[in-house]
Image (spheres, coloured by chain):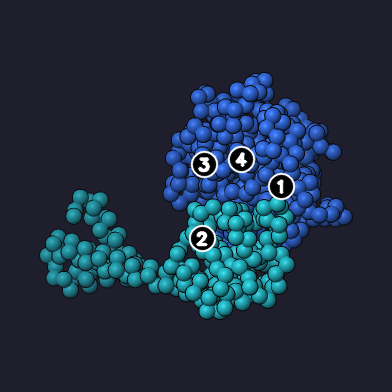
Chain colours: A cyan, B blue
Amino acid sequence: MYKLMLVDSDSDRSGSLEAALLAAGYTHIIRIGSGDNLMNAVRNHQPDIILIDMQSPDRDTLESLRNVSRETPKPIVFFAEQSDYETTRAAINAGVSAYIVDDLPGKRLKSVLEVAIARFQEYQKLKEELEDYKSRLQDRKDVDKAKGILMQHRNLSEEEAYQLLRKMAMDRNMKIGEAARNFIAAMALLGGK
Amino acid sequence: MMKQKLRIGFLPLTDCAVLVAALERGFFEKYSLHVTLQREVSWANIRDRVAFGELDAAHMLAPMPLAATLGIDGLGIPMQAAFSLGLNGSAITLASNLMDDMQVLFPQHLQTSPLRATGLKALLASQPGRKLVFASVYPFSQHHYLLRAWLQDGGLDLERDVEIQVIPPPQMVNSLAEGKIDGYCAGEPWNQLAVQRGIGHVAVSSYELWNNGPEKVLGVTQAWAEANPETHVNLLCALLEAAQWLENHHNRARIAELLARPEYLDMPVEVIRPPLLGHYRYAPREPERFLPDFNVFARYAANFPWHSHGAYFLAQMQAAGQLPSTLADEAEILARVYRTDIYRLAADILSLPYPLGNDLPKSGNIAPWVLREASQPIAMGSTYAVLHHNRAE
């Protein structure tokens, strides 16, 4: 059975990937985070396949293991050398990359990589959703603050203040949250609160 | 319709300065280019994102487009470079405790600076079985090749006496501090940071190994260059202007401030600025030395992608076992990858002088000279390479 090593600083994601790989029948999995000594881990565990998060700078270290040395008796190659263009592209878009020992059949790798791509894409989507949620939350806060300033300075009702902000945003072709932030910044500059 | 929205990748190193200057000083805008600079964490990411079109272009180690076109970089998607992002700019740093050991045992080898690796050879001869561990930043890099040449010059056997690893630049200083490596070759600010922290001594700068040698280029895929010829030339014009801007001494101080920002190097300006102004510190308790050519961004035809530099890289790849056979079509490969023709188009638009030949004249000039085989004569710096005289050439 092949030995897999997962290098990822996001332990939630690598945990989820591990579970998916276990379900796919891969039982021999080593997980390491960033900051761990990758070279030592590779020497000690001698994995057949390494899956690595593209945010890890250790990729360049793996690129150097193409030459056979005493420490790595089998050369490790970038998965693209054994894989097709589309799979490589999908992996790069998802932010995951893989290295394998040179004599591993490409077919095997592809199935492992497909599981990894799916997990990474899922996390990317979750992250985007979270960021979207955060930015909507921030927009709401800023709009409330801008409304407060308008109500106080211009003696407006809440609804009137909101309509004024909305008009400001529409006139400038920006989102209401953005308009609110600009307005707050301008007021701060003028010494208002 | 010319492609105007571009994403350009870079690694947080001082020599991404031309890209940052082009963005921050409005040179991209001047040529109707809307550029986003995207920081990456590894050269492998740069290669992949350029290869698959997520990035239009990137700050690349000069040998990378050659390795890609030769199909030896693991991906094999042909790339090219029409612009060199500068000359020199890196150094070899040794661990301070290694220097201390040599100072006690073999002071005769430390009497001159820049240092040769002969002291390391003597140290190894006195301690049989010891292997020194060095690091460079990427297998296809001038850092790797200079490190090999410097060690060999000192009489070290690259198989028996040393192990050369690859470590990302931001991890170099910590690896040195933790004793995982004995030394490394990297770009700035990573050498000056080790000196500032008192854990490293600069043995030799890349300038001293090869006066005005190649370092980084702007890399694009061949497919991108063919699809976007107009954008490519405009991009080069913007970069040529940015590089010229960087040759002004006052602007060097300004670019240091810009580079220090969180979105670029995210490092203290005090570490970034001195080398840009030609002030270089070799050892923790020494005054700075004056190395005015430590970073060259435009002068001496610095932006021209010389075929002779490419030929040197091909020879280094072969020596390092990265390129198995001799190349039958070397000239053809160089012409395909190092696009002097596109460079000349852009320089001509700006009425900047450009070389007419593709190769730097062979004999190493040890003093400033004038290149006359050019559209207008070009003032050049020394091209002396101390190490390559030992080579087969």
Q: Chain of mark 1?
A: B
The image quadrant that residue A114 belongs to is bottom right
Specify the amino acid type for callout 2: Ile
Residue at the disc numbered 1: B305
Could one spot residue B135 in this view of the protein?
A: yes
| Other-residue count near label 4 (Cα within 10 Å), few / some / many at <14 / 14–19 / ≥20 | many
Give the mark nearest the N terminus, 3 or 4. 3
Q: Nearest the camera: A38 or B33? A: A38
Give the mark nearest the N terminus, 3 or 1. 3
Q: Is residue B282 left or right of residue A108?
A: left
Q: Nearest the camera: A86 or B175? A: B175
| Other-residue count near label 3 (Cα within 10 Å), few / some / many at <14 / 14–19 / ≥20 | few
State how far apart marks 2 and 3 are (Cα): 20 Å
Could one spot residue A58 in this view of the protein?
A: no
Q: Are discs 1 and 4 located on one and the same chain?
A: yes
State how far apart marks 1 and 2 are (Cα): 41 Å
Q: Chain of mark 3?
A: B
Of circles 3 and 4, the one toward us is: 3
Residue at the disc numbered 3: B178
Q: Chain of mark 2?
A: A
Q: Residue at (63%, 23%) from the top-left corner?
A: B105
Residue at the disc numbered 4: B184
The quadrant of the rendering that contains the C terminus of chain B is: top right
